Each structure stands twice: as structure tokens, then as C-alpha cells.
Image (tube, rainbow, N blue to C red):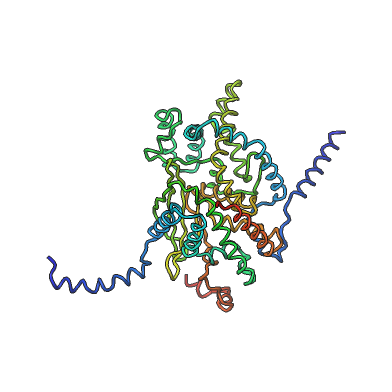
Amino acid sequence: MISRRHLIALAPAFALAPRLAFAQGAVEPGAFVSEFAQKGIVDILAAKIANAEKQTRFRSMFTTSFDLPSIGRFVLGRYARTVKPEDLSAFQPLFEDVIVYTWSRRFSEYNGQTLKVGASTPDGDEGAIVKSTIVGNAGENFAVDWRLRKRPDGWKIVDVIVAGVSMAITYRQEYTTLIAQQGGFPGLITQLQKQVGDLKAAQPA
Amino acid sequence: MSISSLLRTSILLLAGLTASACATRPPATNPEAVAAYEEARDPLEPFNRAMFRTDQALDKALVRPVVKTYRFMVPEGGRQSVGNALRNLRSPITLVHDVLQGQPNRAGITLSRFFVNTFIGVLGLFDVGEEIGLPYHSEDFGQTLAVWGVGDGPFIYVPLFGPSTLRDGTGYGVDAFFVDPLAWYSRGNGAETWIQWVVLGGTYINLKDETMFATDELEASSIDYYAALRSAYRQIRASEIRNGAPPPMEDFDEFSSTFQTPTLAAKAASEMPQTSLTSER
């Protein structure tokens, strides 16, 4: 039986609880990934809406859940330190478009796959890596690791690693090779503009 | 033509070929380009790109039609079983390298899988091991060399064979002809060398069938498919060498939006000789 005295002793603990939860990041990294995937499946992949609407919803979810400014700088490698601010602001929206249109091309092929979230381990500067498996309905599955960082407004995804291949590292090695070959940053921008155009044209109706 | 002049001509030809095939290292005045060049570890890039174009042409003309025919003739479930059986045939190679890498637990898993899949899984057609908690993994001589501290060396692109590195390409040859018991068997029975070639061919078509979707996606999402493929190949190998652990990305946080560039004063202070600090330790 809980006495009145016990209740009084518990009161400060309750008062403290919300603040503690906030300090610890409130949401566990695994739960964050789980929620992200669930939202993606329900609101976008399995939703009975037009592809254009799926694209809009994905872009808003993608830009709020990913730390795109950081990823955009990372994929430029050492060029990120010397790039002119106006070149960087031309690059960021193009990079966003490349990923949005690359992913949205495949939305209509969704076939009931689910994401099974596994263990998470600490990583880098206040970050975590969450392991997960995409489980297909024919029993085929593959490993996806999510690299997260804690930002003032909560967890952000900074990289997706599919079967050992990091999206951020692959883009970085491709883009730094391209800049070197095109003899500078403007060459990359021109190529990206062309790619975005091609990807837009390849979208399903 | 005498032997010596023939020799001289071929050496000159080879020298000329290598000279024209080598990528020029960017000048030190362009540190960003130097960093990109060093990260790519691809000194034969122009030659490799030519090989890559040949590979893509052969892929379109030859490999794709074969894979398409295979897909048309054998249904999904059958192709899965072919893949399982080929993996099972490769397990002795994985076992040798589990041992050479000092991984007794993984060696135990490989050995148990081999027996379970061969005898219960009907010659490996069914992956029973996976169902009873013996997950598949693959090892090869390239991975063993990496564990022993050998770097991957220059990138090499071989038409039909695909992306590789000096270390992993050498490792593949050693495995295929010296480690694989099937190679020993087929050579020991002079007339049975066809067995090895049939398995190699089957492995090739199966690999293309399994990876075509992923490589097509990579091609569609990239501007420079060669550079993206080179990066993905190296990452897959690194991931296999780490036995599936996620890649470290120590420098990621330097690029984050919240990262503060160190002020010049702080940078100068950190570069000053810190005798008092080091002597205390």
C-alpha cells in the first residue's frame, strides 16, 4: 500500500521526469527510425494518392527528417571548404531534387515490404547508427543502416547505408571525381541540372 | 624480326600504353583535386574507363540477353535455389579463409551450414541453415589479405569481370584455381575440367541476375556511373572485410551544419608545440 508520505516523495520525481526525458533526447534512435519508416509506408508508399502528391509528401518528410545541409557539404568533400556561398546555394536544391526524384521513381513499385528495426550503437558527435532490415514478402531481405545525429530540433538522418554502401560516401566520391574532371564547380552544377531534368522526365504519371 | 628487336618493340609499346593510360596527378596547387585523386586510388583511370566502356557494350550485346533468357526459362524460386546451391559449393573457400582470418566461430557456422544445406537442403538447393540461425557469410583470399594488412591497391576494371582491385583480383584468381576443391577435383580428373567451367559460368550468370537491379539503379541515380560504381565496389568490399559493421565516417561532423570552423587563434594555439601538456602525461 502506498502511503501519503511515499506519494509526496514521488512528486518531485514526476516533476523532473519530463525534463529528464527532454535531456536524454526523448525519443530513442531506434524508435525514430521506426516512426520514419512507418510514416513513409502509410503516408506515401501504401497511400492511395497520385504520384505527384506522393512526391510532395516525400519531399517534406525528407527535408525535415534528414540533415540535408550537412549531407550536401559532406558530399562535396574538401571542395566544401573552398566553394563560393552562391555556388553552394545553387548546389543544395539540385542535390535535394536528385535524391527526391531518384527515390520517387520507384514509389509505385512498393509491394508490402516492411522495415524491421534492430540494435543501435553510438556514433560520432552525439550520434547513433541504427541497424535495420528491409523484409520483402517473398522472404528476400537486405540490411539498411541509418546514421543519425542529434540536432537542436531532434534526431536527423545523415546517411543511409544499404548493404554496406553508404549513400553519402558514394555521392561524395562521384561528385569530387566530377568536379576534378569538369575542371571546377560550375561543371558539376551543369551536370546536375541535366540529371534532374532526365529524372523528372522518367517519373511515372 | 629478331627476338631482341621484338622485345624492344614490345617494351616500347607497353611503356607508351602505360604512359597514355595513366591518370595525371593533379598539381599540388589544387589540394581539393589531389584529395579526390588520392581517395579514388585509380592511377589507371583513363585505361579503366576504356575497359569499362567495353564492358558496358559487351553487357548490352551479350550478358543481358543471356540473363534475360535465364530469367525467362527459370522461375524466381528456381533461380533462388540455383543461387543457394552455388553458394553452398563455395563454402569450402569461405571455410579456409575463416580459419586463415582466425575466426573459429565463423568457421564453425560455415562448416555447419555446409553439412546442413548439403544433406538436409538437397545438395544446397535449399538454405536450411538460414532458417535455423546459421546466417550466410562469404570470405575470400582478398579479404584474408586485407585482414593481414594488405591494402587494396589500384582499382582495375576488367571487361565482363567487372570492378576489382589489384589485391582482390589476385585473391579471386588464387581462390578459383588453387583454393577451390572443385578446381583440384576437375584438374585431378583430366577430362572433367568442364565441371569447373560450368560452375564458373553459372556463378557468373547468377551474380549478374542478382546484382542487375542494384547496378541499374546506381546507373540511373548517378551522373558518372563509372565513379559511382568504383565507390560502391570499394565500399562493398570494405563492408565484407569488416564482416558487415557500418563504415566509420570520422570526418562527417566536420561538414555538419552545426560545426564551428576553428578560429585562426584557436588553430594557431593548437599547432603550437605543447611541451608542458605532453611532459605531464
Residue ranking furthest to the bottom: B265
Residue A133 drawn at (x, y percent): 43, 49
Q: Nearer the viewer, residue B252 or A75?
A: A75
Q: Nearer the viewer, residue A31 or B196?
A: A31
Residue drawn at (61%, 67%) of the image: A80
Q: In this view of the protein, can residue B104 be seen by the observer?
A: no
Question: In the rendered view, would you say A103 is above or below B132?
Answer: below
Q: Nearer the viewer, residue B170 or B121?
A: B121
The quadrant where residue B212 appears: top right
Residue A174 drawn at (x, y percent): 62, 56
| A31 sits left or right of A93 in the view | left
The quadrant where residue A16 appears: bottom left
Residue B174 drawn at (x, y percent): 59, 36
Q: In this view of the protein, can residue B122 be seen by the observer?
A: yes
Residue A191 drawn at (x, y percent): 66, 59
- Indicate the quadrant containing the N terminus of chain B: top left, top right, bottom left or bottom right: top right
